[in-house]
Amino acid sequence: MTNVQRYLRPESVEQAWALIRDGKEAARPVGGGVDAALYMPPRVTTLVDLSDLPLRYIEAEAGVLRIGAGATLTELLEHGRAAEYLNGIIPETLRRVASPLLRNLATVGGTLASAHPWSDVIPLFLVLGATVVVYDGAARAVAIDEFIGDRRAVAGALITEVLLPSPAAGAAAAFEKFTRTGFDVALLNCACFVAIDDGVCRAVRLAAGGTPDMAKRVPAIEEQLVGGRLDDEAITAAAALAEEAIAVRSDRRASGAYRRILTSAGVRRCLRRIAARQGGTA
């Protein structure tokens, strides 16, 4: 951080955004500071500390779980409201993210802003149907698919909160992650959401990340499962389709061939867990 010349602590979202806007590429917002500590581009001369902003909250309101962008992953993991959401899928997932020390620092907003391809939070939010609220002169809500898929649409905006909708009755979710060590980033991860009514899958969202590209939903598997029962046959077929429908490639962490195997295993494990939670036998 030898190039940093100014350290600013705005007291409002509006002030923070104005400082970031006016500073352009020379200004960088800082939440928990995890990424800032690892790498600071030489062009950055101003740090805008967001820790004083009123964004460190987790609330349930009108059936929606509201998560302030300043909340840390540990705070979200340990919060009672988050634990109540969809049978505890949030703490179940976050316990597998990084290490406790990093979770104590990393913020929800920072996780989304960094948008690392191996992020475990992003595939979870994708399948939960999250909405990201940003401020760029005015507050506006952006579906997480759009937020992740088109970064230009939110360039320069400040993330203020994440909204998780109330899940439908008969819904369940699961998360799976493959790593070399307990605290390592994902070689591949997978999250699934299924809403079942009268034994039939009415809504399905499935996402895979660490492929090693950015996490994406997998429409081919979702469409195959909707309208049918989540039984052994359906799960086996979905796992087989995963090897074709989820695009993978090699990098220094894993080969594309190995990741292709992991896609099948991840989808199978998630769907079996969901079936078991719904009282099935898969």
Image (cartoon, rainbow, N blue to C red):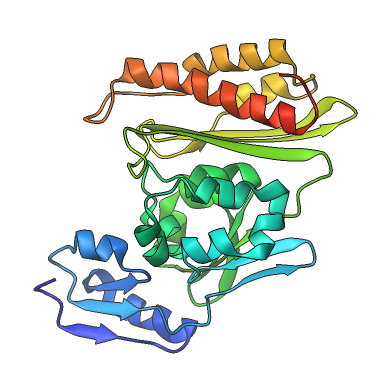
Q: Residue pushed farthest left?
A: 2
**Viewer-proximal residue among 112 and 74:** 74
Image check: 277 left or right of 37? right
Residue 5 spot, x, y in % from top left = 14, 82
Residue 193 spot, x, y in % from top left = 67, 37
On the question of residue 104 being in view, the answer is yes
**Viewer-proximal residue among 41 and 252:** 252
The residue drawn where x is 44% and y is 89% is 11
Image check: 281 left or right of 136? right
Query: Vertical placement of 240 versus 198: above or below?
Result: above
Q: Which quadrant of the rendered structure holds the C terminus?
A: top right
Q: Residue pushed farthest bottom?
A: 11
On the question of residue 145 being in view, the answer is no
Q: Quadrant of residue 273?
A: top right
Query: Vertical placement of 230 versus 20: above or below?
Result: above
Residue 136 spot, x, y in % from top left = 48, 72
Q: Residue pushed farthest right?
A: 198
The residue drawn where x is 72% and y is 39% is 172
Residue 197 spot, x, y in % from top left = 87, 32
Q: Quadrant of residue 280?
A: top right
The residue drawn where x is 38% and y is 37% is 186
Query: Vertical placement of 28 versus 143: above or below?
Result: below
